[in-house]
Image: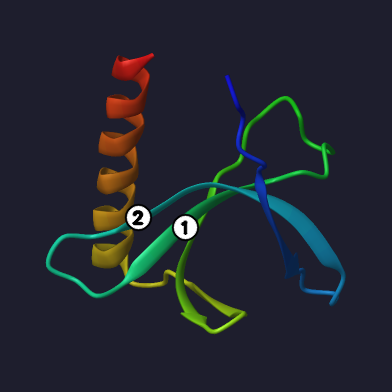
Amino acid sequence: MQFEEPEIIYIPDEDGNEEEFEVIMKFEVDGSDSKYMMVVPLSGENEEEDEVYAFRYEEDGDDLKLYTIEDEEEWNIVEETFNTLLGEMEEEN
């Protein structure tokens, strides 16, 4: 069995320090051109609770642009899609 290398991205925090995150899922929402990714921090500071962050993203060549999801309706769609896909993955295992 071959394991895929995790996709690691770096996102600056509010102080400008780059933090390391692992991309755990990418998906598109039906009926939309928007792409989303779910990431988890690799810092290990808060291991007791897994935090998952969602971003809308665009790829421009090698550049990756991340956008926070601020619209409640968009957030609800992303959350529902993520939970559905996660449930399907758990059923397969």
Q: Which residue is mark 1?
A: 37
- Residue type marked 2: Phe
Does residue 8 sit above or below 88 in this rendering? Answer: below
Quarter of the figure with the C terminus:
top left
- Residue type marked 1: Met
User: Residue 27 shows which numbered tag?
Assistant: 2
CA distance for labels 2 and 1: 6 Å
Does residue 46 sit above or below 70 in this rendering? Answer: above
In the rendered structure, are the residues bearing label 2 and label 1 in contact, judged by CB atoms less than 8 Å apart?
Answer: yes
- Image coordinates of residue 20 in percent, x first then y, are 78, 55
User: Farthest residue toward the bottom?
Assistant: 60
- Name the element at disc 1: strand
- Image coordinates of residue 42 in percent, x first then y, are 77, 43
Look at 47% across and 57% down and name the residue there: 37
Look at 33% across and 60% down and name the residue there: 75
- Image coordinates of residue 92 in percent, x first then y, are 32, 18
Badge 1 crowding class, 10 Å Cα cut-off, few under 14, some 14 to 19, many 20 or more, is some
Does residue 76 sit above or below 17 in this rendering? Answer: above
